[in-house]
Amino acid sequence: MLPAIAAPAPADFSQADIQAIATLREKAFITSREGDYAAADELWTQLLEYLPEEPAIWSNRGIVRASQFQLDEAIADYTQAIALAPDEPDSYLNRGAAYEMQQEWEAAIADYNYVLEIDPQEAGALNNRGNAEAGLGDWEAAIADYKTAADLDPNFALARVNQGLAFYQVDRSDEALKVLRGVVRKYPNFPDARAALTAGLWASNKRGEAESQWVAVEGLDSRYKDVDWVRNIRRWPPKMADALEQFLTLEG
């Protein structure tokens, strides 16, 4: 995520430079938040011409490049941010996420481990490390990290859903359904939880309940109709993605 507070321009800049930097920075934040990543990339790049030693700018450009799936470029930016501020955890967290997108699981885990050395209670790093462990097929390690992340941050619904998905992958379907039902009760408008619950219920022959859950999913997020998206972008575990595909095939 983008930092909320930006560093001031160096005192030796002219007043015109200071104004230009402030304008560029404001525009860069706005375009990043609006999702205009190509424009944001240009603005962060222009800022780096003024402030090449400011790690947050490198990290922010990395974020918008990762959002455009320019992963090698994003990783290079995060690495530069780390070189300038080696004790700042966000750049490691962001670089780990980019490594995940490249399925470089060990590299991602190394970055998340570093974050957890700094702050063992960083729930985001625990959840993300679980994702990378899942990528390696180490589902029990993933379950442990997801559980710890969700226990540390009770509002971290995604980590709890990930725990439920991983339970299903290791054939602990009753536990999976219990976890997913709990998330849906607490967050009824969270489509990931409802879609996962749909798939799990359908595979457990609870078809009426599955169909009622799916009605809510369709009204919340149409992407769950696309199994390729579920498998490759959201990256559900294979068994739950298979269950959703079976549901969609029979429903269709």
Image (cartoon, rainbow, N blue to C red):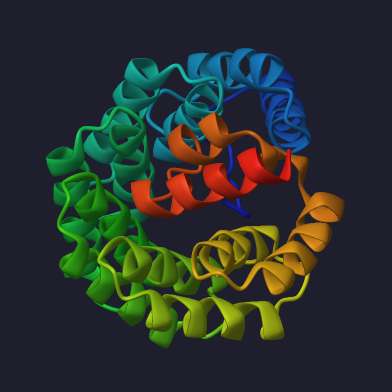
Residue 226: x and y in percent read: 63, 33
Task: Decide if residue 132 is on the left or right side of residue 214.
Answer: left
Q: Quadrant of residue 41?
A: top right
Viewer-closest of 9 and 188? 188
Residue 163: x and y in percent read: 38, 71
Q: Residue at x 15, y 57 (%)?
A: 138
Quadrant the C terminus occupies: top right
Q: Is residue 173 above or below residue 49?
A: below
Q: Residue at x 67, y 26 (%)?
A: 21
Q: Is residue 125 above or below residue 23?
A: below
Task: Decide if residue 24 is on the left or right side of residue 4.
Answer: right
Task: Decide if residue 206 is on the left or right side of residue 138.
Answer: right
Give the residue at the far right of this rendering. 219
Q: Is residue 230 above or below residue 145?
A: above
Q: Would residue 77 be seen by someone viewing this image from the given angle? A: yes
Q: Is residue 250 above or below residue 72?
A: below
Viewer-closest of 32 and 222? 222
Q: Residue at x 71, y 77 (%)?
A: 187
Residue 63: x and y in percent read: 50, 33
Q: Residue at x 31, y 61 (%)?
A: 169
Viewer-closest of 170 and 148? 170
